[in-house]
Image (cartoon, grey):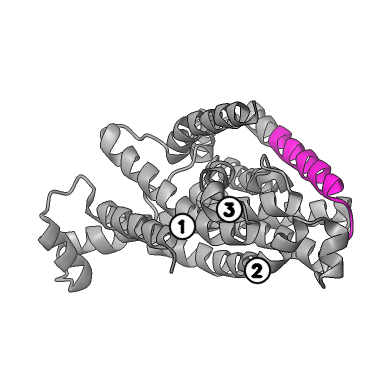
């Protein structure tokens, strides 16, 4: 195992442990860990197993999957500005969730919000495939994704604009900011199958993405099936982004920034960047969720706000560094 892999694994493990120990419930480290592992049926066991553990697990799953999807999209499109939300899945998933809140389904049925978000994500990816075609160019895929994302965003704004209930509108806005608060193990089980399926698809693309750096003709000459590669990227990204958005709302910048931060450590190899961005994304969301609970604990600071506040300056720094290195 490389030094980079060991470092990233150590960071994720450390942040995961800290995430389990951070919270308003006052308890020693030993008491917290005993309550998690042994469990005595007391209040601390409930806190550890039903509140903190699901939150930490979702941070790893969502952060890792978004980082992986970002690296896969950038590798496939050969565009460092590509983002997992580029194909319109996150916007479509958000629209499904917004509809469930506005219509009252989310209040009537606990699972309505994540399920409607998954339906929205599925609808979005089907429309993208229909518009771009299974063998269409990368440009067609980008344009189709932008169109679906813009349309979903417009419909979401329309729902907010016409909402007669200010409380529903407020709930929609807060949900769209992204958060891991008040999530349970049920949310983990809802998202886990799709995240595992999508991540499994994306993790197999290492060889194809490496070959694609030489151009499509060279990749085909090396035996890479470009149609299969394209579908795997789209479906894998749709699965992980749809599942992540369904349970945590919109969380941006992870899939865009993390591949940039780690690309230099893997000699700009798209295949190696997949696993590195997975670990890096998991660490980024864990760190951001810890900040949410530490910086302003008495206020409900949203995870998506923190990732944007951290990710945007990092991205600007990367742009500045890239410009300087090009001079």
Is 66 drawn above or below residue 167 in the view shown?
below
In the rendered structure, are the residues bearing label 1 and label 2 in contact, judged by CB atoms less than 8 Å apart? no
> Principal SS element in the magenta part?
helix
Residue 279 colored in magenta in the image:
no
Q: Which residue is mark 1?
A: 279
Cα–Cα span, label 1 and label 2: 17 Å
Q: Residue at x 37, y 34 (%)?
A: 301
Element assignment for label 3: loop
Q: Quadrant of the C terminus?
A: top right
Is 167 drawn above or below residue 101 in the view shown?
above
Q: Position of residue 240 (x, y in %)?
A: 59, 58
Q: Is residue 305 visible?
A: yes
Q: Which residue is mark 2?
A: 201
Element assignment for label 1: helix
Mark 2 nearby-residue class (10 Å; few <14, some 14–19, many ≥20)? some
Q: Which residue is mark 3?
A: 267
How many numbered callouts? 3
| Between discs 3 and 2, the one toward the N terminus | 2
Q: Nearer the viewer, mark 3 or mark 1?
A: 3
Is 50 drawn above or below residue 40 in the view shown?
above
Instruction: Give the residues in magenta.
Output: 134-155
């Amino acid at each position: 195992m490389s030094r980079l892999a060991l470092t990233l694994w150590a960071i994720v493990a450390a942040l995961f442990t800290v995430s389990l120990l951070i919270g308003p419930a006052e308890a020693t480290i030993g008491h917290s860990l005993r309550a998690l592992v042994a469990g005595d049926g007391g209040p601390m066991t409930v806190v550890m197993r039903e509140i903190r553990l699901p939150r930490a697990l979702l941070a790893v799953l969502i952060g890792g999957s978004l980082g992986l999807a970002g690296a896969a999209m950038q590798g496939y499109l050969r565009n460092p500005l590509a983002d997992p939300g580029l194909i319109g899945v996150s916007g479509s998933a958000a629209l499904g969730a917004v509809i469930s809140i506005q219509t009252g389904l989310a209040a009537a049925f606990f699972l309505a919000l994540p399920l409607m978000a998954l339906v929205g994500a599925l609808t979005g990816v089907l429309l993208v495939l229909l518009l771009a075609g299974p063998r269409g160019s990368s440009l067609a895929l980008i344009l189709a994704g932008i169109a679906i994302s813009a349309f979903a965003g417009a419909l979401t704004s329309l729902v907010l604009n016409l909402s007669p209930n200010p409380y529903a509108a407020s709930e929609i806005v807060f949900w769209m900011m992204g958060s891991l608060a008040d999530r349970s193990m049920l949310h983990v089980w809802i998202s886990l199958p799709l995240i595992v399926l999508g991540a499994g698809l994306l993790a197999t693309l290492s060889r194809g993405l490496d070959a694609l750096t030489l151009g499509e003709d060279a990749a085909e000459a090396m035996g890479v099936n470009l149609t299969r590669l394209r579908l795997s990227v789209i479906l894998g990204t749709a699965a992980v982004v749809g599942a992540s958005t369904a349970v945590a709302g919109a969380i941006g910048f992870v899939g865009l920034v993390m591949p940039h931060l780690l690309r230099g450590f893997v000699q700009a190899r798209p295949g190696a960047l997949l696993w590195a961005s997975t670990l890096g994304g998991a660490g980024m969301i864990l760190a951001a969720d810890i900040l949410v609970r530490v910086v302003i604990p008495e206020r409900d600071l949203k995870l998506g706000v923190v990732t944007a506040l951290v990710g945007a300056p990092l991205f600007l720094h990367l742009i500045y560094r890239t410009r300087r290195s090009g001079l």
